[in-house]
Each structure stands twice: as C-alpha cells, then as structure tokens.
Amino acid sequence: MFAGRYEYSIDDKSRVSIPAKFREALSSSADSRLILTNLDGCIVAYPYQEWLNIQDKVSASGPMRKETRAFLRYFYSGATECTLDKLGRILIPQALKTDAHIQKNVVIVGVGKKIEVWAKEKWEELVRLATADPDQIADIVSELGL
C-alpha cells in the first residue's frame, strides 16, 4: 500500500525520483516496473501486477457503454511501462506530462494501490477544494466510516 505526499522536481530529461518509501514497497513485490497513464488530471503509476489486475477486471466486465469505451481508449493510450533506474527515478513521457499539465514541480502521492504524480499547482487546487467545506468533510468521513 502506498501512502504519503512528497514534493519533487522533474529534471531536464523528464525524470523524477520515486520516494524511497514507495521504492521499498515496490521492491518487496520483486517487480519494480510501473505502468504510467493519465487519470483524474494527473499521472497514475500502477505497480505492474496491479495493472494486470486492472486489465483482468476490464476484460471481465462485459458489454460497455460508449462513454466507457471512449474512456478506456484514452486510459490505455497513455499506458507506458517504466522501470526505476539505479537512482530510483522514472522517465515521464512528454505526452503524459502535457496531459497532466506538469512542467517542473510535482507532488507524488500514495493512494492505496497506486501512486499519483500531480503538477504542484493542480495538487494545491485539489487540496483547496477538498478541504473547503467542513460539513462535506464530516459527511465523507462518516460515509467512509473513519
């Protein structure tokens, strides 16, 4: 499981470090490959085995609405396999950076079974919106049973 928030900068070669805590979690699975794609305005990095699980779920889901098929085309079209280099960095493809509006500064967030890479400005806006209404937060906390 991935959890936590880390701020990094992307270097001139479009590489970014994966937090050590996340690298440890990946190495425990004996497969440090990540599949990157676009989702919710950020880049999502799935461990390779989790990506295979997603593909299995999609394949087993049966007939799909037109909107679902369109989303899956977008989702799969961005999928890129990345391997961590010796320094724990991944190379982020330009197309994914463009779609996520990432230029230099990023926030890397652990979200359960996946890692998200956000443009810092978009992350700050997301946090502002997510925390703006205390009553809504209370409802969500109650709904989740936290």
Image (cartoon, rainbow, N blue to C red):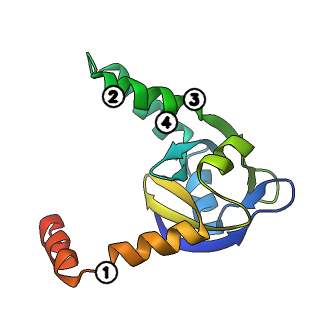
Labels 2 and 1 touching (C-beta < 8 A) = no
Q: Is residue 146 left or right of residue 100?
A: left
Location of the C terminus by quadrant is bottom left
Q: Amino acid at mark 2?
A: Glu
Residue holding disc 1? 132
Residue holding disc 3? 77
Task: Give the mark toward the camera: 3 or 4.
Answer: 3
53 vs 84: above or below: above
71 vs 39: above or below: above
Q: Quadrant of residue 107?
A: bottom right
Q: Could you tell me residue 55's position as x and y percent?
A: 43, 27
Real-space CA distance between mark 2 and mark 1, rounded to the nearest whole angstrom:
31 Å
- Element carrying mark 3: helix
Q: Amino acid at mark 3?
A: Ser
Labels 1 and 4 touching (C-beta < 8 A) = no
Residue holding disc 2? 67
Q: Is residue 34 left or right of residue 87?
A: left
Few, some or many residues within 10 Å of mark 1 (<14, 14–19, 20+) = few
Asked if residue 8 shows in the view, the reply is yes
- Element carrying mark 4: helix
Q: Could you tell me residue 118's position as x and y percent?
A: 57, 62
Asked if residue 32 shows in the view, the reply is no
Closer to the camera in the image, 125 or 25: 125
In the current view of this chain or complex, which residue is farthest to the top? Answer: 63
**First in residue order: circle 2 vs circle 3:** 2
Labels 3 and 1 touching (C-beta < 8 A) = no
Location of the N terminus by quadrant is bottom left
106 vs 80: above or below: below
Residue holding disc 4? 51
